[in-house]
Image (spheres, helix red, strand yellow):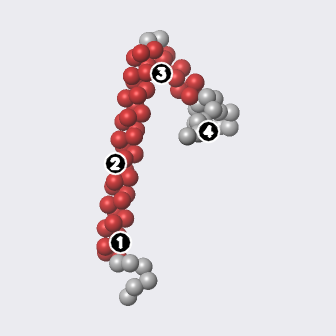
Amino acid sequence: MSHEPAERWDGRLPGVETIAAAYLMAAGGDAALALRRAIADALADLGEAERRTRQRDRLISRGYVRAGPVGRG
């Protein structure tokens, strides 16, 4: 498993330290609360990603059934 650096300087998404600091600030300095909120948000994002994957897979399956295999006919 590879890990991203704690801070990113390439203009893309914020790094781990930036995100952790934001959660800690939003939790009023309560590290346990910040951790619980970060985990809850991560689980919600994971659930949404899984839901979208299932939806995409269903759409692909329906398209395959309608069109039949490519190269036949």
**Is there a contact, CB below 8 Å, between mark 2 and mark 3?**
no
Q: Tell me if mark 4 has few (under 14), some (14-19) or many (20+) residues whose alpha carbon lies within 10 angstroms of its own.
A: few
Q: Tell me if mark 2 has few (under 14), some (14-19) or many (20+) residues whose alpha carbon lies within 10 angstroms of its own.
A: few
> Where, by quadrant of the figure, is residue 45 drawn?
top left
Residue type, numbered disc 3: Tyr
Query: Where does label 2 land, which residue?
Result: 51
Disc on the earlier residue, 2 or 1: 2
Residue type, numbered disc 1: Tyr
Disc on the earlier residue, 1 or 4: 4
Image position of 27 (left or right of 12): left
**Viewer-nearest residue: 71 or 52:** 71
Q: CA distance from mark 1 to mark 4?
A: 36 Å
| Element at label 1 | helix
The location of residue 65, given as percent across then percent down, is 31, 73
Query: Where does label 1 land, which residue?
Result: 64
Residue drawn at (48%, 17%) of the image: 24
The location of residue 30, given as percent across then percent down, is 44, 12
Residue drawn at (35%, 72%) of the image: 64
Query: Where does label 3 land, which residue?
Result: 23
